[in-house]
């Protein structure tokens, strides 16, 4: 349940403090700072940060994500580590500062205006992070240690993204918690891909998540208990399934968004407006509300132009992850064009499982074309449209678009 907060703090003047809401008054009495923080709308939790912080000023030159015409960013303040304290010396101030503001700009472009007009990011002496209305806690490690694989960018962006997913748009029940965590997790790697301009790191993260999901409790001689579906929310984790909440709700939930994003990409132009438009409408429709998975399913169906209940059944309420065995052969026609025959064997999923899978066809001279095919048990063999050239290579599941295993086979 959401509530309004009116919080008053008495703080030693040598320390800095920030809380949720708007700082409506600050006065000093001796060595004590008395500050009052009031939320402008109800929120479901509250927090504050206090410590020996140094205020990291936000500068326009830190921005690397293009500003949109007429865009207004929140007032952003970052409280980083003050040097020579017990939790270490900060040396990534500029990087953190730039990421926070770039996150704000990128997520406003992708989803809509930030729900908070005043925003604070505060270093905390823990290994994790947490988000509240207008406030995030960031582990001191992200201020202190460099990460060359994009992990820092993902972590910071995940917590900022919660202003949109979890704070601005909440979720109805534990069945729908992936709308907060899965959405924020994918927002994190989407930001990393954009700000670093590094597709290789992006796909490396996706592959790592996929391997962990596929190999979860698969041992040398036996298999452990299967992970539950996203639909189970926090109930996926038990004494026998430790770690499944993060793995399924965060990582697999993020993969669901990745699959939807790739189903909506224009394969000719690589334009992604459909995905962005869908996410923006979902955010604007359910801002300050608690949507269900069914609400998101209806939004996806609207923007896909078809009933997507099959997709949500397979990926949210069930646990199957397909394995595809792919083979193809070519045949030259009398007219000098080429027929391509494809065969896909689908395993490890129910008989009624289907999925839309993109294929990349490469030709001599760096020429290429992309197509989508719907793969199911009832469609094990199919023929591609007639091609003017013989393919040099065909990549099944291009852009790592589907959470699956792929084995390439020779046609026999």
Image: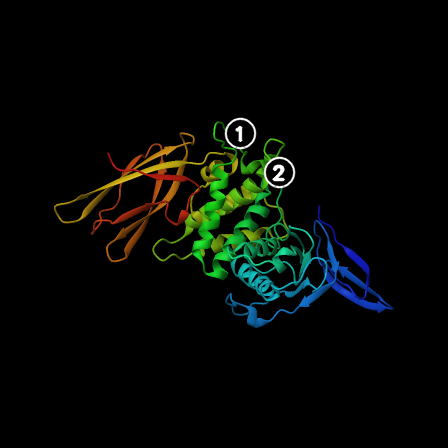
Question: Quarter holding the C terminus?
Answer: top left
Name the element at disc 2.
helix
**Display colour scheme:** rainbow
Picture layout, residue 93 above or below residue 41: below
Residue that lies at the very extreme toward the right in this rendered image: 30
Question: Quarter holding the N terminus?
Answer: top right
Q: Nearer the viewer, residue 318 or 13?
A: 13
**Residue 77, picture quadrant:** bottom right
Residue in the picture at 65% in, 69% down = 57
The 10 Å Cα crowd at callout 1, few under 14, some 14 to 19, many 20 or more, is: few
Residue in the picture at 58% in, 47% down = 181
Query: What residue is shown with label 1?
Result: 224
Residue in the picture at 82% in, 68% down = 27
Q: Nearer the viewer, residue 136 or 287?
A: 136
Name the element at disc 1.
loop
Relative image position of residue 368 (x, y in whole percent): 29, 54
Picture layout, residue 172 above or below residue 31: above
Query: What residue is shown with label 2?
Result: 234
């Amino acid at each position: 349940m959401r509530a309004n907060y009116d919080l008053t703090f008495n703080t030693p003047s040598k320390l800095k403090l920030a809380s949720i809401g708007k700082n409506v008054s600050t006065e000093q009495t001796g060595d004590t700072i008395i500050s009052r923080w009031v939320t402008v709308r109800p929120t479901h939790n509250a927090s504050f940060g206090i410590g020996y912080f140094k205020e990291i000023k936000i500068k326009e030159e830190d921005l690397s994500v293009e500003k949109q015409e007429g865009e207004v960013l929140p007032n952003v303040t970052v409280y980083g580590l003050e040097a020579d304290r017990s939790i270490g010396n900060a040396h990534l101030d500029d990087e953190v500062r730039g990421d926070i503001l770039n996150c704000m700009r990128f997520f406003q472009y992708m989803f809509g205006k930030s729900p908070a007009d005043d925003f604070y990011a505060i270093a905390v002496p823990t290994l994790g992070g947490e988000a509240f209305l207008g406030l995030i806690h960031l582990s001191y490690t992200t201020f202190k240690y460099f990460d060359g694989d994009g992990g820092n960018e993902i972590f910071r962006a995940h917590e900022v993204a919660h202003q949109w997913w979890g704070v601005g748009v909440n979720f109805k029940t534990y069945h729908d918690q992936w709308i907060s965590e899965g959405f924020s997790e994918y927002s994190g790697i989407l930001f990393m891909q954009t700000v670093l301009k590094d597709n290789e790191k992006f796909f490396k993260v996706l592959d790592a998540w996929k391997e962990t999901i596929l190999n979860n409790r698969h041992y040398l001689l036996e298999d452990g208990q299967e992970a539950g579906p996203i639909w189970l929310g926090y109930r996926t984790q038990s004494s026998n399934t430790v770690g499944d909440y993060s793995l399924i709700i965060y990582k697999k939930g993020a993969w669901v968004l990745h699959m939807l994003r790739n189903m909506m990409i224009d394969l000719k132009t690589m334009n992604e407006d459909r995905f962005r438009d869908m996410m923006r409408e979902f955010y604007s429709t359910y801002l300050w509300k608690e949507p269900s998975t069914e609400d998101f399913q209806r939004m996806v169906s609207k923007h896909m132009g078809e009933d997507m209940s099959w997709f949500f059944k397979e990926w949210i309420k069930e646990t199957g992850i397909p394995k595809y065995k792919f083979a193809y052969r070519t045949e030259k026609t009398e007219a000098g064009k080429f027929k391509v025959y494809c065969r896909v064997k689908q395993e490890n999923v129910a008989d009624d499982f289907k999925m839309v899978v993109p294929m990349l066809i490469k030709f001599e001279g760096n020429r290429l074309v992309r197509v989508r095919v719907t793969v199911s048990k009832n469609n094990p063999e199919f023929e591609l449209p007639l091609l003017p050239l013989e393919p040099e290579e065909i990549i099944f599941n291009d852009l790592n678009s589907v959470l699956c295993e792929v084995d390439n086979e020779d046609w026999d």
